[in-house]
Image (cartoon, rainbow, N blue to C red):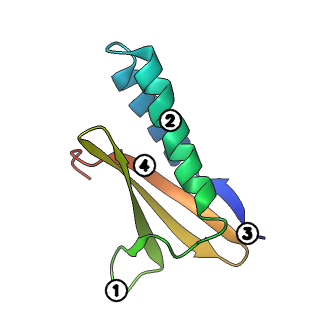
Amino acid sequence: MLSIKWLPEAKIDLERLYEFIKPHSQNAAAKAILILVEAVNSLKKFPEKGRPWQADTAFRELPVIFGSKGYVIRYRLHKEQIIIVRVWHSLEDR
């Protein structure tokens, strides 16, 4: 079975997204992070679930719906690992 590895930048992204939502609703912030983590864990069964990011790279992007917009998880497959590279809100400038 594939394992998940979060790069430090992706972990920082989760913290940043949580802190952005938290002043409005701590429950919504926690739910957003839970949904993102569940989406990442779903990649263990379906690692190619996300769309290719660019044709000439090994990176993929997984859109995750939350609220009226959502998030994007960028990841890549490497051997027996799914490496989570970054996580953004869909409206953020990447």
Residue 80, percent from left and from top: 73, 74
Q: What residue does disc 2 label? A: 33
Q: Vertical placement of 90 versus 59: above or below? A: above
Amino acid type indicated by mark 3: Leu
Cα separation between marks 3 and 4: 20 Å
Q: What residue does disc 4 label? A: 87
Residue 29, percent from left and from top: 43, 25
Cα separation between marks 4 and 2: 11 Å
Task: Give me the residue at 41% from left, 24% from top.
Answer: 28
Residue contact between numbered discs 4 and 1, judged by CB atoms under 8 Å = no
Cα separation between marks 1 and 2: 29 Å
Give the side of residue 88 with respect to residue 68, left or right.
Answer: right
Residue 62, percent from left and from top: 42, 62
Res 12 seen here: no
Task: Give me the residue at 50% from left, 42% from top.
Answer: 35
For marks 1 and 2 on the same chain, the one whose residue lies earlier in the sequence? 2
Q: Vertical placement of 36 versus 40: above or below? A: above
Amino acid type indicated by mark 1: Ala
Give the side of residue 83 with respect to residue 70, left or right.
Answer: right
Element on which disc 1 rests: loop
